[in-house]
Amino acid sequence: EDQVTQSPEALRLQEGESSSLNCSYTVSGLRGLFWYRQDPGKGPEFLFTLYSAGEEKEKERLKATLTKKESFLHITAPKPEDSATYLCAVRPYTGGGNKLTFGTGTQLKVEL
Amino acid sequence: DAGITQSPRHKVTETGTPVTLRCHQTENHRYMYWYRQDPGHGLRLIHYSYGVKDTDKGEVSDGYSVSRSKTEDFLLTLESATSSQTSVYFCAIKEASGGDTQYFGPGTRLTVL
């Protein structure tokens, strides 16, 4: 059974204080790993897809990295507008329908 | 914005009543999905569709049915709503142009009293 565990559950940072969110996964062959951002009362917003170990992707203050067992979302010099819940999901090679398994998310709050 | 709308956005209903949620997309995507999101569980797949009249179950499909009679609409029906179905429901699509990324709608908050 595919599993995704995100840590920490919640994280409080001061503006400018860099940190990393973790997504560890167990999957029968990883086809893709996805990061989303979710603001309160809204649907998840796509950030990144990673396909193979060693791959990195960046967008503004965010950088996602992937190993064979986990992914990290690095946040450099965060701002209050980066406050949100960050979700990680995996898609295995097996099974049809492009089904994703999600973690429960990390709730990030960035304070002034 | 993947051109996804959900209706209604909020609904309060009573136990035992039927409820239908609608997901509408404007860009002719083949794959559509229904998820529910609950504290401590993350997003869980209820049903998905891979074409008109082609649907399959997800991990939490009991008590739910779906229909897709045209490409743009994917309906989720709770035949007889229960309090355990109080949740936020999200629709998602996967673009047909390749890649595996799913894009989500704004959600429907359903409360079953």
Image (cartoon, coloured by chain):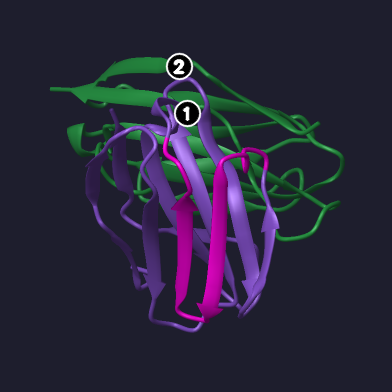
Chain colours: A green, B purple
Q: Callout 2, which amino acid? A: Glu
Q: Residue at x 37, y 32 (%)?
A: B86
Query: Going by the image, does A38 lie left or right of B28?
Result: left
Query: Going by the image, does B94 lie left or right of A47?
Result: right
Q: Residue at x 24, y 45 (%)?
A: B11
Q: Residue at x 62, y 38 (%)?
A: B60
Q: Tell me the residue that label 2 is attached to.
A: A9
Q: Are marks 2 and 1 in contact (CB under 8 Å)?
A: yes
Q: Which mark is residue A105?
A: 1
Q: How many other residues sit within 10 Å of disc 2, few (<14), some (14-19) or many (≥20)?
A: some
Magenta-colored span: B59-81
Q: How many other residues sit within 10 Å of disc 1, few (<14), some (14-19) or many (≥20)?
A: many
Position in image of residue A10 (x %, y %):
39, 16
Q: Callout 1, which amino acid? A: Gly
Position in image of residue A28 (x %, y %):
86, 39
Q: Quadrant of the N terminus of chain B?
A: bottom left
Q: Which mark is residue A83?
A: none
**Label 1 secondary element:** loop
Position in image of residue A45 (x %, y %):
39, 52
- Name above or below for residue B15 compared with residue B95: above
